[in-house]
Amino acid sequence: MSASSTVIEDIETARKYGLASLAIFYCDFREEQKKDLRGLVSSVLFQLSDQSDSYHDVLSIFYSTHDDGARSPSDDELACCLKNLLELPGQAPAYLIIDALDEFPNTSAIPSPREEVLTLVTQLMESQLTNLRICITSRPETDIKIILEPLSFRSVSIHDERGQMEDIENYIKSVVNTDPRNRRWKAEHKQLVIDILTERADGM
């Protein structure tokens, strides 16, 4: 279960009653469309437009101005469309959840995909959109902390919480001790595997 699952469940309840809009993006470096700014913004636009007629109208106009999809918009144009959509008055609060932001590649490209996403988040926060609520989960990477810490209203760290580590250790113990393939392992070998995997999980 991801770190954002509890947050999502609470917002989903509000969304079902028309009290919120919700867009979730999980970065997955194994899928091309899930590891860069374009994939994020496109996904968010699609999800939000499906939850509000007004949002849908904004996206429809955007689509038509790009020759009904024949002309591909730039990343900046997509980001601008998202801001226009979120500026619409009279809408329920829109929740944007970016899960595993640290999984966006931090390559040598200038800017890197991660930097582009951080720039968008910064722009959205600085725009002070009254309807927007942003929740981001990430490992505490230095470049991410530098950008997000000055912007965050509330930050919760589970990196060093004992309960988190205990849950991970218990899960690993269960897998190691119940997998038939490990039946012939000596007890000390099983414990070594448990210790190493728990340490390398690093709270995730």
Image: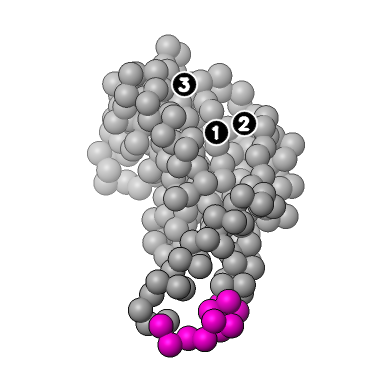
Magenta: main secondary structure = helix
Q: Amino acid at mark 1?
A: Ile
Choose mark 1 or mark 2, whichever is in front. 1
In percent of width and height, residue 184 lies at 43, 87
What is the number of the mark on residue 57?
A: none
On screen, residue 53 above or below 97:
above
What is the number of the mark on residue 93?
A: 3
First in sequence, mark 1 or 3: give its number.
3
Is 64 in front, or is 198? 198
Whole-angstrom CA distance, mark 1 to mark 2, is 8 Å
Q: Which residue is mark 2?
A: 125
Look at the numbered discs 1 and 2 and tell me whether their residues touch, using CB distance below 8 Å: yes
Q: Is residue 61 visible?
A: no
Whole-angstrom CA distance, mark 2 to mark 3, is 14 Å
Picture colour scheme: one colour
Q: Which residues are magenta?
A: 183-193
Q: Residue at x 37, y 26 (%)?
A: 13
* SS at circle 2: helix
In percent of width and height, residue 194 lies at 56, 72
First in sequence, mark 2 or 3: give its number.
3
**The image quarter in which residue 60 lies:** top left
55 part of magenta stretch:
no
Q: Amino acid at mark 3?
A: Pro
In percent of width and height, residue 79 lies at 48, 38
What is the number of the mark on residue 134?
A: 1
Badge 2: few (under 14), some or many (20 or more) residues near its Cα, within 10 Å? some
Left or right of 30: which side holds 128?
A: right
Q: Residue at x 29, y 21 (%)?
A: 53
In percent of width and height, residue 165 lies at 61, 56
